Amino acid sequence: MLEARLDGRNPTIGIVLGSGLGSLAEHVENACYVPFGEIPHMKRSTATSHVGRFVCGELGGTCVMVMQGRLHGYEGNTAQEVAFPIWLMHKLGIETLITTNAAGAINESFAVGDFCIMTDHINFTGQNPIVGTEPDEIAFRFFSMKDAYDPDLRSVALSIAEREGIRVQEGVYLGLLGPSFETPAEIKMFRSWGADTVAMSVVEEVIAARHVGIRVLGMSLCSNMACGIEGASPSDIEVFEVARQREYDFCRLITLIIREIG
């Protein structure tokens, strides 16, 4: 059904836009739009600022499929329902996934407004989309998560950011179920585990992508310091305000990365 709606477009790069970052989809040219709710078996997005639709067209000279918003476990979705659009994009020919989100910075050397390229992740959601028999029918259930975040893609992103003067960090991302923000005690524990950023998405998508051989670039916008760091007490208002301030550099960085790898 979704393939028919693309009207002959053949995207090779998928992009997932996280909280406050959906404006990148407005830069897609010659676009077609398909709401999540019109796709059989796919859940609707209920998260604030998540439009909940696929946008397919040209960005950075490449045909891309953008998720303008995503699905989360905290919306009541199972891990497989969160992963479903990633497997769907794979069926449509997506070979590379760029997944983005807003995250809290645990690493005290990071600053609010920094971008962070994910080097690895800790899945602390309590969920894994490969559980069960159905995913094993898509691809073999046992697979390596070494270099889940592709080193070559990370290198491209870092090189472009340096060239363009955009402040970018690298670090380990920790994914939680949410929807409540973390406690200061939890943040101290996560820091001792080696986590640099924390949020409530991404990990299920990345597991699903690696399950079917899609290479992944993950990038967070550090929209706030994590709870207790420098006295921080995160809120949605802060997340969206920082995203608005960093919108230009975010759109520029992702577009240039696509131009390089497309």
Image (cartoon, rainbow, N blue to C red):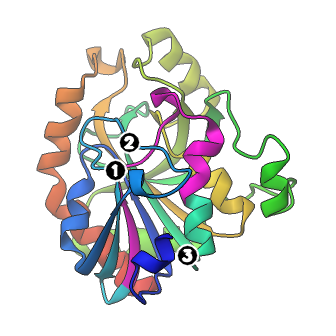
> Residue 129 occupies which quadrant of the picture?
top right
Residue at left offset 27%, top offset 14%: 231
Q: Quadrant of the C terminus?
A: bottom left
Q: Was residue 18 drawn as part of the magenta stretch in this picture?
A: no
Would residue 13 be found to the left or right of residue 162 on screen?
right
Residue at left offset 43%, top offset 30%: 106
Report how far apart the C-alphas of labels 2 and 3 lie in the structure: 21 Å
Task: Give the label on residue 207, or none.
Answer: none
Q: Looking at the picture, how far across and down is residue 57, in whole percent? A: 32, 80
> Residue 35 occupies which quadrant of the picture?
bottom left
Residue at left offset 36%, top offset 14%: 228
Q: Which residues are magenta?
A: 63-85
Residue 238 in sight here? yes
Give the class, few, some or many, for how many residues have Cα within 10 Å of label 3's Cα (few <14, many ≥20): many
The residue type indicated by label 1 comes to Gly
**Residue highlighted by disc 1:** 52
Report how far apart the C-alphas of labels 1 and 3 lie in the structure: 19 Å
Is 161 in front, or is 130? 130
Q: Was residue 65 drawn as part of the magenta stretch in this picture?
A: yes
Residue at left offset 37%, top offset 66%: 66
**Residue highlighted by disc 3:** 94
Q: Looking at the picture, how far across and down is residue 225, in whole percent? A: 31, 29
Question: Looking at the image, do the residues carrying marks 2 and 1 touch, with CB atoms under 8 Å apart?
Answer: yes
Question: Looking at the image, do the residues carrying marks 2 and 3 touch, with CB atoms under 8 Å apart?
Answer: no
- In the displayed structure, would residue 162 be above or below residue 193? below
Ranked by sequence position, the earlier of labels 1 and 3 is: 1
Would residue 181 be found to the left or right of residue 21 on screen?
right
Report how far apart the C-alphas of labels 2 and 1 lie in the structure: 5 Å
Q: Looking at the picture, how far across and down is residue 237, in whole percent? A: 17, 28
**Residue highlighted by disc 2:** 45
